[in-house]
Image: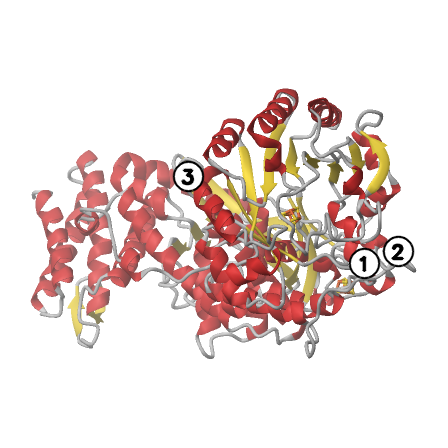
Amino acid sequence: MSASVSQYVLKVCSRCDLACDHCYVYEHADQSWRAKPRFIAWATAARAAKRIREHAESHRLDTVHVVLHGGEPLLLGHDGLREILSSLRSSIDPVTQLDLRIHTNGVLLDEKLCALFADYGVQVGVSLDGDRPANDRHRRFSDGRSSYAQVRRALSLLRKTEYRHLYAGILCTVDVRNDPIAVYEALLVEAPPRLDLLLPHATWDQPPDRPPGTLRPYADWLGKLHSRWVADGRPVPIRYFDSLLAAWQGRPSGSEAVGLDPVDLLVIETDGAWEQADSLKTAYENAPATGFNIFAHSVDEAAAHPGVASRQDGIAALCSTCRECHVVRACGGGLYAHRYRSDNGFDNPSVYCEDLKVLIPQVVSRPRNVPMTSLPESDPAASHSLPEGAFELLSAGPGNPAAMASLAESYWSVTRALVAQVASGLDGEGGDLGRAAVEGWTLLSALDAERPEAVREVLTYPYVQAWAMQCLSPGKSADLDLDYAHLAGLAASAAVRAGIETELTLPVRDGSIYLPSVGALAVGTGTGRTSAVRISPSGLSTRDGSLAWQSVRHVTAGDLSITVEDIDPFRDCNAWAPSGRLSSATWKDWRLGLAAAVRQLTAELPAYASVICTGLRSIVPMRPGVVGQRQSGTAQQAFGALALVLPDDVETLSGLLIHEMQHVKLTALCDLFDLFDREDRRRFPVPWRADPRPVEAVLHGTYAHLALADLWRSRSARTPHGEARRLFLMYRSWVDKGIDALLNVGTLTPHGERFVHGMRSAVEAWGS
Ligand code: SF4
Ligand code: SF4
């Protein structure tokens, strides 16, 4: 069976009201338009709809895309278009999702047509070549008049609130004699939801215009526009660049102009002829023809035409020069038509080859500017906001889930900025590891634009900030190239979460590759410093097929869903000694213990439990018996994480959880607000330790013991005269003494005083 086809260009009119001198329909080699009916007949359109429907049904296609095209399709008029749209909708809608579009020069677009397109759900794309001088260079009426004003009026119609949802974007044909920045700025003024850039169609017989004295003018022109677009923060998707990136990353390019995707497109002419892509009109007379038509031949028959079938073979169908090219994955040999030479057909590189070889590396591996775009730095104003009353709720002990979520939000901003800062240090040096880092960052940035929730899920994993800090702190990293290449691991994790297929080179660390928050793959120590991995929705695989996979383990209990992290290479946070991979028996103890502790806390202190369930993402098992190590801890650079040695009993474990989560919250709060004078180096006696402590430690200790006092207060309510009450009174006295010390030392800021008075109010509310 032939390949399925999901994209159709339906020519509804073979003439145009403009006479653009760069038009490949009328001005290039194929002049077959002269013999075509001016307009498609209704019966032809209905038959086309039937063919598309049959094919969608037999191939069980989820979606088909139909673009009404010309010439100029609006010449068909309102009623003619309505008949065709109605026919397409009534025929195809019942069997599959129909994505209907029209591509126009815009000259005739009016309110009535916009209303028609709104009725039939038709997206409208418009051609515009940039500012007035650029557009007037080619896009004129036959008498030489400019079409610029009419096209801009059409675009202003599409920007109206009632039609904005129909606005598909702008297609701009490149002319290197235009100023790329002026073109870019003029296109942005039209607020398109998407832009596409089209290289003027050309072949080796009819090469593109190259002004005297220029070597690779198309690389220069597109490179300048790309640089400006990146520096601006990629304010609008530009399909040509996005497609190159996607193809480079092993994803479908979504464009016949680049990449190695099989061809999935047929054209239906106004006489019902099945044809190949219109761009072939530039090659020779009748180049797009297949000899098939919709009356006698099905889509399957047309798709079996050798010209279509030969373009299903990916890299194997390319010439030997392209097959060996280092950018072939993105380029794909360029647009098929651009390879044509009359003496050997299409067995050539693109006539734009020299430009593509220069442009593509810029587009796919230019990380320095990407942070400004895909991972913007945090907005300090936004990060300093807490919901109304959240500060008071936090100062009283537990806070609430909304307050916890907003602390997490502020950390997210910080982590994005840190990751972007790491990436800004990439220079492509460092051999395979350097390339892995660049490739990873490129993918991460692209995913951030397309699947931001997947990127966020990975970058908010607590040990990501610990990793970034290690990269950015001089002397902390023992192997900076290896650490930077962890960007590829982050990208791989985001790709897994996004469910996309791609291939990535990942750093090998101690014989394994790591996907933070997802798992690790043992590839052995003899494989070099990197390993290529194929990522697909069904899992991971390496080139040699080896797959010793360890998943990150999860505990889910009630509203709690956290990882027990025993594999992430940055889980020590430079703060504690982590255990290695837990044995099955030890893991079972952790799983059951944590579930029991959360259940117990939910019964005893539901307010604290709900905040833990909101803000805790991960726990690192600490190696027991390490001299000088406490039994639990948190790290400033790992928001949402804590580490502990699993105690023998649930009561102690639940106490450790609420104790450490107090540190997590207060650390975040101290990042948002100045609570005390950080220049104050004095130390103060505290009842819970023998050695005097700095003010920050007094504050942290008091806040942690506030939660423990509350816990034992709750427990003592059930056993009033036992050990629980003794512990409640002890912790409460520690809190009282801590508060007194803090209020007396004169080092608190107004925010700090507010916070400490909040703790005091909570204690006083307990009574005696
Ligand atoms: S508007 Fe399009 S179809 Fe019409 S002449 Fe110009 S390029 Fe050709
Ligand atoms: S850059 Fe040139 S050689 Fe490389 S794939 Fe593209 S057309 Fe072929």
Residue named by callout 3: 595
Name the residue located 49 percent from the left edge and 34 percent from the top edge.
Answer: 114
Measure how far apart labels 1 and 3 are at the Cα level.
63 Å
User: Where residue 672 appears, x then y in whole percent?
Assistant: 26, 60
Q: Quadrant of residue 77?
A: top right
Residue named by callout 1: 339
In the image, residue 654 above or below residue 229: above
The type of colouring in the image is secondary structure
Amino acid type, residue under disc 2 in the picture:
Gly
Give whichever of discs 2 and 3 has the lower sequence position. Answer: 2
User: Where residue 625 appears, x then y in whole percent?
Assistant: 44, 62
Q: Is residue 407 left or right of residue 131?
A: left
Q: Secondary structure at mark 3?
A: helix
Residue named by callout 2: 345
Q: Secondary structure at mark 1?
A: helix
Residue 536 at least partly seen: yes
Amino acid type, residue under disc 1 in the picture:
Arg
Q: What crowding class fits label 2: few (fewer than 14 Cα within 10 Å), some (14-19), or many (20 or more)? A: few
